[in-house]
Image (cartoon, rainbow, N blue to C red):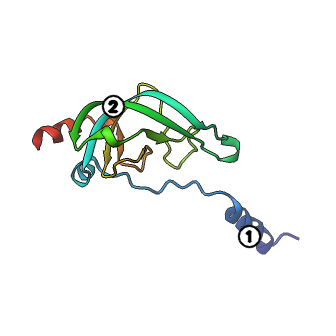
Amino acid sequence: MLTTHNLLVPLALMLCLSPAYAFKCKPLAAVDAWHNSSNIFLAEVTDVEVIQEGNKATNDAGERHGHFTVLEQFKGSAKTIPYLRSANHPICCIGQVKLDKGDQFYIFTSASDEPVYVNACAAAKYRKDHDELLKLKNSH
């Protein structure tokens, strides 16, 4: 006989045992990123190297490194940043980005001598979506 209890227990188990993919980060606004970063530059990915292939079937995003050219430096120096990092196979709903040759990003960081991880939650913005940064540059 089906009861409410018989239906709720399996449902609760499914919810608890399933991987959660809720995307809960709040990307840093461009204006805040501008004021909170000591190193800001516009980078173009010139070469991509797959470090770990990953596997979407097992929710393994893998990793790729993007070597880049600085198109414009706004603050600090990009010379100490060795490369950009991203997922190789972005997994749904967790804000991952896949670097590709030719991609352009505004990079905001206070770190030096470390690679910068690029995702929707990081302080890295696709150029096509954030050219208003040029207005910030001209106002400072």
Residue at numbered disc 1:
8
**Quarter occupied by residue 22:** bottom right
Regarding residue 42, the answer to whether it shows in the image is: yes
Q: Nearer the viewer, residue 1 or 70?
A: 70
Q: Nearer the viewer, residue 52 or 121?
A: 52
Q: Nearer the viewer, mark 1 or mark 2?
A: 2
> Residue at left 45%, top 26%?
101
Residue 38 position within the rendered picture, expressed as x and y whole percent measured from the top left: 24, 50
Neighbor class of circle 2 (other Cα within 10 Å; few <14, some 14-19, many 20+) is few
Q: Which residue is mark 2?
A: 128
Residue at horizontal 50 percent and vertical 53 percent from the top: 23
**Residue pictured at 57% horizontal, 34% vertical:** 50
Q: Quadrant of residue 129?
A: top left
| Quadrant (top left/top right/bottom left/bottom right) for the N terminus | bottom right
Q: Residue furthest right?
A: 1
Residue 4 position (above or below residue 101): below
Q: Is residue 90 above or below residue 67?
A: below
Q: Is residue 132 visible?
A: no
**Quick one: label 1 or label 2, which is nearer the N terminus?**
1
Circle on res. 123? none
Q: Residue at x 16, y 39 (%)?
A: 137
Q: CA distance from mark 1 to mark 2?
A: 47 Å
- Give the quadrant of the C terminus: top left
Relative to the observer, which residue lies in front, 63 or 136? 63
Question: Is 1 displayed left or right of 139 in the figure?
Answer: right
* Foreground pick, 67 / 23: 67
Q: What amino acid type should be assigned to the residue bearing mark 2?
A: Lys
Kind of residue sitting beneath label 1: Leu
How far across and down, in percent of the image, does residue 59 sit?
65, 47
- Label 1 CA crowd tier, 10 Å (few <14, some 14–19, many 20+): few
Q: Position of residue 103 (x, y in %)?
A: 40, 29
Residue 97 location (% of width, % of height): 48, 40
